[in-house]
Amino acid sequence: MARNSYFQFKQFRVEQGQSAMKITTDACLLGARAEVEHSHFILDIGAGTGLLSLMAAQRSDAVIDAVEMDDQAALQATENFKASPWSTQITLHHSSIQSFMPEKRYDCILCNPPFFENAFKAPCSKRSLARHTDSLSFMELATNIDRLLSDEGKAWILLPVDSSSLLLKEIKQVTELKLEQTITVRSSETHKDHRHILVLGYCNSESFHEQITIYSEHPFYTSATTELLKPYYLKL
């Protein structure tokens, strides 16, 4: 996906010039696959450009709270929300998730969190902050999801394959949350899985697995990916 200063979707436009982390196909898959249609309250942790909140708003009538601690990203997300058809549905909270103290719990949490724990830092400090867990450790992410998720709620989290096991370790140690589903993402049938979408909740049933293959042959999407992204992408 080209990293332009904006990305135009069918029903909204996302300006991303001031955000450290740009829109990716993987993030769009998370936004398209997450089950938000029947949610009443949705929380977007680390909103960035506001992409996940906007994708959720397109498919639900939920009240959406987007939390972002970076100054420029928070400003950009606010502008994107105001310019969208759902300006009254989404609220940007300029805060760390650790300091966010709402009076409600959420039946859906969306998160595309910092990627790399104790890994080499990117040269750009803002991009480094967005991609690493220094400002939000996996233990903090786990405890805050546990604090904010309703008893019947689901949390949808996008992580690199190597990082998902680290988060699941913390989830098991500090919460009662269970892994209900793992959605693996790969570029094509000849590529290894590169992302996991973890679905967390308090259900004790056995977790199940789903595979998303993005391309049948680059740049052509598989039929499954096309169906997921068709409500959003202009050219599908």
Image (tube, grey):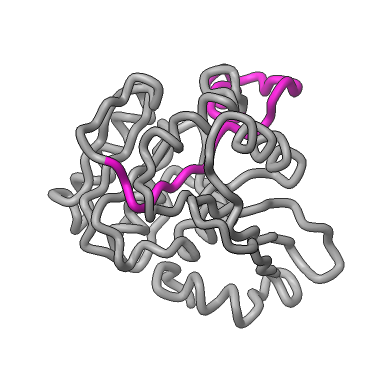
In the image, residue 236 above or below residue 76: below
At horizontal 36% and vertical 62% (from top left) the residue drawn is: 36
Residue projecting furthest to the front = 204
Residue projecting furthest to the bottom = 223
In the image, residue 228 above or below residue 109: below
Question: Is residue 174 visible to the viewer in this orientation of the structure?
Answer: yes
**Residue 82: quarter of image:** top left
In the image, residue 68 above or below residue 105: above
Q: How many marks?
A: 0
Q: Is residue 110 magenta?
A: yes
The magenta region covers 105-131
**Which x, y percent locates residue 224?**
60, 78
At horizontal 34% and vertical 50% (from top left) the residue drawn is: 53
Q: Is residue 133 magenta?
A: no
At horizontal 63% and vertical 44% (from top left) the residue drawn is: 159
Q: Nearer the viewer, residue 184 or 84?
A: 184
**Which x, y percent locates residue 191?**
83, 62
Image quadrant where one finds the N terminus: bottom right
Residue projecting furthest to the left = 88
Q: Is residue 72 left or right of residue 112?
A: left
**Which x, y percent locates residue 156?**
50, 51
**Residue 97: quarter of image:** top left
**Which x, y percent locates residue 73?**
38, 30
Question: Is residue 70 visible to the viewer in this orientation of the structure?
Answer: no
At horizontal 41% and vertical 37% (from top left) the residue drawn is: 45
Q: Is residue 131 left or right of residue 84?
A: right
